Amino acid sequence: MTVPDLSKSPISLHCERRMRAPLTLPGWKFVQGRWSMALLAALMARSLVAGVPQNATRDAQAAAPRSTQQQPAAPVDINHATMRELMQVPGMTQSWAARIVRFRPYRTKQDLLDKGVVTSQVYDRIKDFVIAHRDKQ
């Protein structure tokens, strides 16, 4: 059996006696034989099973409540609160708090969505903890 030169083309994976549909993986060398195929399959399976996707980890961390945050006793006024006071709102991040301060004043807390200051997901997390007063308290 002759092995074709695939150094400049995508690889083809096949077993010793029968040719399977080629699997192209750019940059890989030619893999031949039963043991090579088994090793390749084991490595691919390990990478799928062992590794948790980074997005799933990041989403789980974002959804987990922060234990260091204290819930405010009263709703936080988005027109007059400092960055530190806004950060006490559960689900609030520093970047969202900065956007709220930047786009003041607000007539109602719904203005956060209407003006595009926060996304609907962020608004759903914080809406029960914020209020918009027009006058200075």
Image: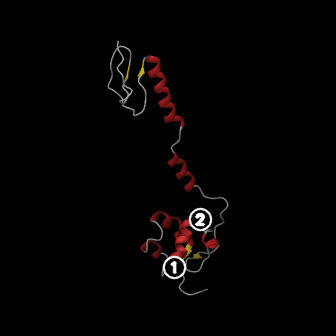
Residue 16 relative to residue 58: left or right: left
C-alpha span from label 2 to label 1: 20 Å
Q: Residue 15, labelled with which disc?
A: none
**Residue that label 1 marks:** 104
Quadrant of residue 30 within the rendered picture: top left
x 47%, y 26%: residue: 40
Q: Give the amino acid type for the residue marked by disc 2 in the picture.
A: Pro
Q: Position of residue 47 (x, y in %)?
A: 51, 34
Q: Give the amino acid type for the residue marked by disc 1 in the picture.
A: Arg
x 39%, y 34%: residue: 26
- Number of labels in the image equals 2
x 55%, y 66%: residue: 95
Q: Residue 90, labelled with which disc?
A: 2
Tell me: residue 69, above or below residue 8: below
Quadrant of residue 81 within the rendered picture: bottom right
Quadrant of residue 90 within the rendered picture: bottom right
Residue 57 relative to residue 20: left or right: right
Label 1 sits on a secondary structure element that is: loop
x 39%, y 26%: residue: 7
Tell me: residue 73, above or below residue 18: below
**Disc 2 residue crowd, few under 14, some 14–19, many 20+, Cα 10 Å:** some
Q: Position of residue 135 (x, y in %)?
A: 56, 87
